[in-house]
Image (spheres, helix red, strand yellow):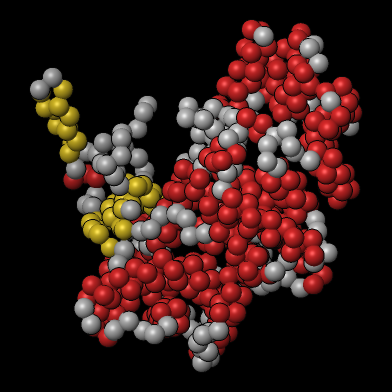
Amino acid sequence: MAASEAEAALEAAYRKEKRRVLATLIRLLGGFDAAEEALHEAFAAAAQRWPREGVPKNPYAWLVSAGRFKTIDRWRREGRQAALLPELAVLMEPFEEPEMPKAVADDELRLIFTCCHPALAPDQRVALTLREVGGLTTEEIARAYLATPPTIAQRIVRAKAKIRDEAIPYAVPGRAELAERFESVLRVVYLVFSEGYAATGGPVLTRADLCAEAIRLGRLVVGLTGEAEASGLLALMLINEARRASRTDAAGDIVLLEAQDRVLWDRAMIAEAGELIAAAFASHGVGPYTLQAAIAALHAEAASFAATDWQAIVSLYDVLLRVDPSPVVRLNRAAALGMRDGPDAGLAAVDVAMAAGGLDAYHLAHAARADMLRRLGRTADARAAYGKALELVHQEAERRFLERRLAALENG
Amino acid sequence: MRYACLIYYDPKKLFGGSAEAKAALEQCEGYDEALKESGHFVAAEALEMPEGSMTLTVRDGKMSAVDGPFMETRDMLGGIIVIDAADLNEAVRVAGGHPLARIGAIEVRPVVDFSTPPPEL
């Protein structure tokens, strides 16, 4: 076999199988560090042997097997048999080559549940999931989160130490905990997407790589679990992603939904989201993600801003409020109400939402209020509300947007 | 990416004859061999005691050379290993396997990638 052919096969295996081989090795070896070392050794062995012996039929199984035996060798060399007898016993069991995709998928699912364990802090869950499930490097994660690599590296080291010290199992939780743990998995995926979609700080509004990775993770969770809410989350991310190109103009400034060029929207993504939402509704497992996706779909499927079905959107927000009575949902419902019934009703609803608490420091609440006041012609009040929003905003593009609105008010 | 692993230790501790230190010193060679086998190895050198070093500066074209290390500390820079690793976490894991991490400390520092702009300070 030509060496270049083996090299190409190795590169393809690295791209395609690395994450899955790692997931299986983590289960087999019982820890991240041993598994990462084994993964590295397995690929080093493949680089030596594939050009000579040919590319194995099942690269995944070959790599898992190589990683496992390298680890046994190393532990023997280090004289660790005595301390590690139980682990060695597991490792020495004949390894059933998991030809069936399900067993492999189960390993990835175990890993996701471990990385998103509620015992870890949310930022630890995000970093660990991106690195161990997503295969991103420490440096890439740091760049995406505008943090230094040592900050992210330490977060990951601490998360792994916590998993080891608290003996958090590599397992899909039992029925009793499943709902809560599953919720944590979806939240991590959505946190990754949200950070990519509307960065909380810094000069760039979207970070496409984080969104792409969140969607990949979302697809993985849908494929592994088939849960309705996983489909709902994936649909929600797809619809937002479909509108990416229209969300900012050439200068990187925000374009509001009503002014977005709908021709730029990715219809294939929106159609896929529509199917996911329909399937989720048919399964009776509808939760907050599916409802938010359904609302986003109503926006995405409207021929124009004016043709939006505000009645249906307000109704969906009413259902969403029942499962997720959060301040932001109240605010969004108020904004939709303002579109359905006019700025008078909208302003009253925004004030009710703000009186319910939790929105005083949220710049978009003041921006929504300012918008209703502007539409009512109460310029002085609108100016004050935009000023309040400007005091609270952190993101550069959003600041510029609010400043433009304020300037338009002065000139208008 | 390449990372320099700077190995610091207190020579009184490392060469003080404790069983722990002796064992660590014996294992150093094996660690380098393991790095070569795993493909992480780029280069490694152990350094002589700082008493053997000179520190030089050139200012206005004039060189001044003084004896001793650049920084006088209880811990000395005792060795340098350059490794190739996928990311900082992998470098930290690999460096964590060094026997002297148990006695001294290892600073892991990315090697400069000259295709990127210099830092803004």
Q: Which residue sits at x=56%, y=40%?
A: A263
Q: Quadrant of the N terminus of chain A?
A: bottom left
- Left or right position of A174 against A159: right
In this view of the protein, can residue B53 be seen by the observer?
A: yes
Q: On the rendered structure, is A246 left or right of A376?
A: left
- Where is residue B6? Give x, y as percent: 33, 50
Using the rendered image of the protein, determine whether residue A156 is visible from the camera's viewpoint.
Answer: no
Residue B96 horizontal side relative to residue A239, left or right: left
Question: Whole-percent x and y of residue A405?
Answer: 65, 18
Image spot of residue B7 (x, y percent): 34, 52
For image coordinates 28% across by 63% down, the residue present is: B41
Quadrant (top left, top right, bottom left, bottom right) of the C terminus of chain A: top right
Quadrant of res A158: bottom right
Q: Nearer the viewer, residue A339 or A94?
A: A339
Q: Position of residue A303 (x, y in %)?
A: 68, 41
Identify whether B83 is placed above or below A333.
Answer: below
- Along the line of sight, the residue nearer the viewer: A173 or A169: A173
Residue furthest to the bottom in view is A94
Residue at image position (70%, 69%) is: A226
Viewer-proximal residue among A80 and A130: A130
Q: Which residue lies at the image location 53% right of the left edge and 75% below the top edge?
A: A24
User: How many numbered marks does the figure carry?
Assistant: 0
Vertical order, A5 against A69 (above or below) = above
* A363 w.r.t. B76: above or below: above
| Residue A274 vertical placement versus A389 (above, below) | below
